[in-house]
Image: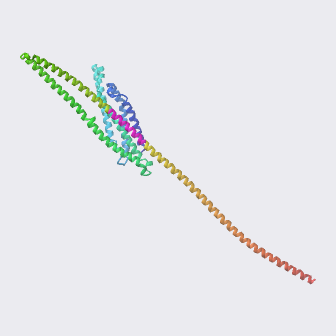
Amino acid sequence: MPELRELCDKIEQETASLREKVSARKWAELSRRGFIYNVENILPGIEELYALFQIAGQELGKSAESNAPKTIDHERELNQLITSLGRNREMEEARIRKSQEKGLLALAETITVPELYSDLEQKTLSMLLKSNYLAERIRVFERKKEPLMNVKGAQRNVLDLLEKREIELQNLRKKYEDTRKNFFLGLVEKNTTSDLENDMNELARKLETQTALMKKSMETYKETFTELERHNAELEQKTAIIEETQAQMSGKMLDVMTALKKERDYAKKIVMETEHETLQLRNTYSKELLGLQEEKMSIKNALGEKYEKQLGELKRDNKDKTELIRHFQETVLGKERKIAQLEEENLKLALIGKTIEKHQKARETFLKKEKKQRKKLK
């Protein structure tokens, strides 16, 4: 599935670009117009990311593998984030329009909701981190389907190990998200802060009520019990001290809540940055392992081709030499047969020569006898 690799590259590029835009400035420091501009700047990228994951989900749906990554839940979360950002942008635009109609535009620019802006920033960064993580899972799954990695079962150990680690990390991440939601960033912390504020307000109301009743009692009985003026003065002094202490306590508690909120935002940022760095390290580690695996397979295939070529050349050379030896053997056998024929012919010629020699001697003897007979007749 070569198209999945291209989709993963596009997703990673889009998430990197969006993260750079989102992290350019803290959203809690933005004005209303700055928030609107920022959302309008990143919303098309998130919609493009949503479309890319839809295409990737369709491509993964064509696979019959049961362990193929699922994108449907992530697509739902992306859609919710797009809806939330769009709705908040429309609300801020509506507030600016209303303030402009009332002639309070300058005042509206100074009134912001930093907690809401910061929360949307953290949700966006978290979604980008999840997108990068899911793209890496899709990449590893797609690389396992390549023919290069299917030569032997032992060669898939690295990818199988990565898949197991990804499943463990996914389960751990889910537990971590639930824990963080319930005990760090979730309802428990919000309820704790809210309960603390409610308790403080309740104590303040009770204190104010008791103070008012005390003052009223003092005024009622002041004329009748003049001898208690000194005690009343002391009581008023104590009441003033209590009121001053209450004011100091309220200020301190407000400072504590502000510090806790700042620490919470800072902890969120540290967690997001740590997760992002961890994911980058995992991506680098996975790419290096896959690159080493591909390089090893490429070297093995190259050496196999080289040895097969050399073996073919040696076989052809051996065949040629065998043919040459066979030709030499046939030539030698032909020479030997020819030599045998020549020896046989030499033997025949020798016999013929001896026969001719005998015949010549008999002829000479016959001629000598014939000459002697002719001399005798004369």
Q: Where, by quadrant of the figure, is residue 46 drawn?
A: top left
Q: Which residue of the protein is positioned furthest toward the right in this rendering?
A: 378
Check the image and report above or below for 8 versus 214: below
Please state if 52 lies on the left or on the right of 312 as rendered. left
Q: Is residue 275 magenta?
A: yes
Asked if one can make out residue 263 in the rendered structure from this viewpoint, the answer is: yes
Q: Where, by quadrant of the figure, is residue 89 drawn?
A: top left
Check the image and report above or below for 202 versus 340: above
Residue 208, image x, y percentages: 15, 23
What are the residue bounds of the magenta stretch? 268-287
> What number of labels is visible?
0
Identified at 41% across, 47% down, the residue is 158
Residue 262, image x, y percentages: 29, 29
Q: Which residue of the protein is positioned furthest toward the bottom in this rendering?
A: 377
Identified at 33% across, 44% down, the residue is 168
Q: Is residue 362 magenta?
A: no
Identified at 55% across, 54% down, the residue is 312
Q: Where, by quadrant of the figure, is residue 165 drawn?
A: top left
Q: Which residue of the protein is positioned furthest toward the left in this rendering?
A: 224
Q: Main secondary structure of the magenta part?
A: helix
Check the image and report above or below for 197 versus 314: above
Identify the coloring. rainbow
Q: Decide which of 192, 106 is in the foreground and name it.
A: 192
Please state if 202 lies on the left or on the right of 38 as rendered. left
Quadrant of the frame with the N terminus? top left
Asked if one can make out residue 86 in the rendered structure from this viewpoint, the answer is: no
Residue 159, image x, y percentages: 40, 46
Quadrant of the frame with the C terminus? bottom right
Residue 34, image x, y percentages: 34, 25
